[in-house]
């Protein structure tokens, strides 16, 4: 469980000290969009994973699925450079994989019918998809017109 809280603390620190590329509006919009996608993914594979010591949904499970993905996404989007987006997606996929691996090692996350390495291509698709979602749904209209 400490891995979860340490990850959360690091992401919150990054949120306040990283260079800001996103506007406050984009940050606020990214949180529910990414949380929604994380919950959909969680429900789709909930049979194959278990968070925490019991099979019931508890507060740390809710916390993990609702807050960690948006914080990762906001950090990713703030550092993302359009000409290197594939490299960033790979780096962030490996980072997310390492977080999941540490959660597994700590006993917070258990994999039943899901192999840990299955997560790597899923994370890669998520980060590549996040760029598209950001450009189509989240990005401020003033930035869209200035990018053309």
Image (spheres, rainbow, N blue to C red):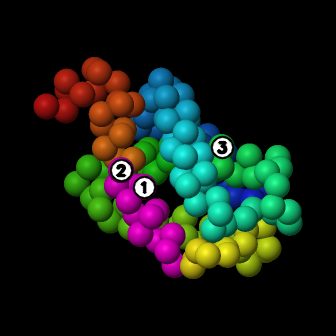
Left or right: where 62 falls relative to 126: right
Q: Number of marks in the image?
A: 3
Q: Position of residue 68 (x, y in %)?
A: 64, 50
Residue that sits furthest to the top in the current view = 142
Question: What residue is pinned by disc 2?
Answer: 129
Tell which circle, 1 or 3, labels the residue nearer the N-terminal end: 3
Q: Are marks 1 and 2 in contact (CB under 8 Å)?
A: yes
Q: Which mark is residue 25?
A: none
Front residue of this view, candidates 75 and 103: 103
Q: Are marks 3 and 2 in contact (CB under 8 Å)?
A: no
Tell which circle, 3 or 2, labels the residue nearer the N-terminal end: 3
Question: What residue is pinned by disc 3?
Answer: 66
Q: Residue at x 41, y 69 (%)?
A: 121
Left or right: where 5 falls relative to 37: right
Question: What residue is pinned by disc 1?
Answer: 126
Q: Position of residue 2 (x, y in %)?
A: 82, 63
The residues colored magenta run 117-129
Q: Are marks 1 and 3 in contact (CB under 8 Å)?
A: no
C-alpha separation, residue under disc 1 versus residue under disc 2: 5 Å
Q: Residue at x 74, y 46 (%)?
A: 62
Q: Residue at x 55, y 33 (%)?
A: 32
Q: Secondary structure at mark 1?
A: helix
Q: Secondary structure at mark 3?
A: helix
Q: Is residue 94 above or below residue 123?
A: below
Q: Position of residue 83 (x, y in %)?
A: 22, 54
Question: The N terminus lies in which quarter of the figure?
Answer: bottom right
Question: Quick check: is 107 in the magenta stretch?
Answer: no
Q: Position of residue 142 (x, y in %)?
A: 28, 20
C-alpha separation, residue under disc 1 versus residue under disc 3: 15 Å
Front residue of this view, candidates 138 and 51: 51
Whether residue 122 can be seen here: yes
Packing grade of label 1 (10 A; few <14, some 14-19, many >=20) is some
């Amino acid at each position: 469980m400490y891995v979860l809280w340490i990850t959360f603390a690091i992401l919150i620190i990054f949120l306040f000290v990283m260079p800001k590329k996103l506007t406050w509006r984009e940050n606020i919009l990214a949180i529910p969009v990414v949380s929604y996608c994380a919950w959909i993914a969680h429900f789709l594979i909930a049979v194959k994973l278990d968070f925490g010591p019991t099979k019931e949904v508890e507060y740390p499970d809710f916390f993990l699925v609702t807050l960690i993905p948006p914080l990762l996404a906001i950090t990713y989007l703030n550092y993302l450079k359009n000409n290197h987006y594939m490299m960033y997606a790979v780096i962030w996929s490996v980072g997310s994989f390492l977080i999941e691996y540490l959660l597994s090692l700590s006993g917070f996350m258990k994999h039943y019918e899901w192999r840990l390495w299955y997560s790597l291509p899923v994370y890669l698709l998520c980060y590549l998809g996040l760029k598209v979602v950001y450009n189509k749904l989240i990005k401020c209209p003033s930035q869209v017109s200035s990018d053309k």
